[in-house]
Image (cartoon, coloured by chain):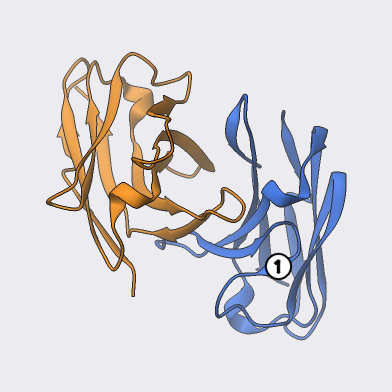
Chain colours: A blue, B orange
């Protein structure tokens, strides 16, 4: 299963909303779809697991949705600390763990 | 609070070996699925290997790109996970992260800070 993320780069201003897409080449169980945030020089941080559940300590401006082959990460109002790269990731029993190529959210 | 601390990275020639360590505090590695994920310079994340919990009945798994060359293991008394990397290639150059796999959705919920491996002559 291949994960495709779009757009590759999203240029936005603080306060704007962001919609990031993750598309799978085959259907993915929602239970096994996660989103991560990574800032330069830092390890990734889990944001969303199970397609729509926020990880501990994640602000409610982050939300996940979707099912089947199409999943979305939404950031309702961008804060300065939200400018980063975002990855989706899925698990299945055969090919195990796969990450998408990432979407960079940068400041317009 | 969970903490994962990697070490063991460095510069190695192609064909050489390195052993990475991930010392864990805050939970017991034998009860959890533990993994290594890497990130080549300027690139995205790539899963490398997983070691399953002692009670899972499963052992280990590897990405095709490292199968036969890398070995993941754990030392229960030291609460440490290792990645033995042999026959290293230039394309193995990356930051290597140790991560815990969450039981809810097979996601990576706790990460170390990473250790840098550079394979170059």
Q: Is residue B77 left or right of residue B39?
A: left
Q: Is residue B8 left or right of residue B68?
A: left
Query: In the figure, residue A47 lies in which quadrant?
Result: bottom right
Q: Quadrant of the C terminus of chain B?
A: top left
Label 1 sits on residue: A53
Secondary structure at numbered mark 1: strand
Query: In the figure, residue B67 lies in which quadrant?
Result: top left
Where A49 falls versus B58 (above or below)?
below
Q: Residue at x 28, y 57 (%)?
A: B28
Where A40 falls versus B97 (above or below)?
below
Q: Residue at x 33, y 58 (%)?
A: B112
Task: Estimate the x, y position of residue B100 in percent, counting from the top left.
Answer: 41, 53
Query: In the figure, residue B89 lies in which quadrant?
Result: top left
Task: Estimate the x, y position of residue A55 in percent, counting from the top left.
Answer: 59, 70
Q: Residue at x 82, y 52 (%)?
A: A71
Where B25 falls versus B80 (above or below)?
below
Give the tally of numbered discs: 1
Task: Estimate the x, y position of residue B120 in percent, counting from the top left.
Answer: 23, 26
Task: Estimate the x, y position of residue A32 in percent, counting from the top left.
Answer: 68, 47
| Chain letter of the residue beneath label 1 in the structure image | A
Where A72 falls versus A78 (above or below)?
above
**Nearest the camera: A7 or A49?**
A49
**Nearest the camera: B43 or A44?**
A44
> Dot 1, how many residues are within 10 Å of its Cα: few (below 14), some (14-19), or many (20+)?
some
Residue B12 appears in the figure: no
Q: Quadrant of the N terminus of chain B?
A: bottom left
Residue B117 appears in the figure: yes
Q: Is residue B90 left or right of residue A88?
A: left
């Amino acid at each position: 299963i291949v994960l495709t993320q779009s757009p590759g780069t999203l240029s936005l201003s603080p306060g704007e909303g962001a919609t990031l897409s993750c598309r799978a080449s085959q259907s993915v169980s929602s239970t096994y779809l996660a989103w991560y945030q990574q800032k330069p020089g830092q390890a990734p941080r889990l944001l969303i697991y199970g397609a729509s559940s926020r990880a501990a300590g994640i602000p409610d401006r982050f939300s996940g949705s979707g099912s089947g082959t199409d999943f979305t990460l939404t950031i309702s109002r961008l804060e300065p600390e939200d400018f980063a790269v975002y990855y989706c990731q899925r698990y299945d029993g055969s090919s195990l763990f796969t990450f998408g190529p990432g979407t960079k959210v940068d400041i317009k | 609070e969970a903490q994962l601390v990697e070490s063991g990275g460095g510069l190695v020639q192609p064909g050489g070996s390195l052993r990475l360590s991930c010392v864990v505090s805050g939970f017991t590695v034998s009860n959890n699925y533990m993994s290594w994920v890497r990130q080549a310079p300027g690139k995205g994340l790539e899963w490398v290997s997983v070691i399953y919990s002692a009670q899972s009945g499963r052992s280990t798994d590897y990405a095709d790109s490292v199968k036969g060359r890398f070995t993941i293991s754990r030392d229960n008394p030291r609460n440490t996970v290792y990645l033995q990397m042999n026959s290293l290639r230039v394309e193995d150059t990356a930051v290597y992260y140790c991560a815990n796999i969450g039981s809810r959705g097979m996601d990576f919920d706790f990460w170390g800070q990473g250790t840098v491996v550079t394979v170059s002559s």
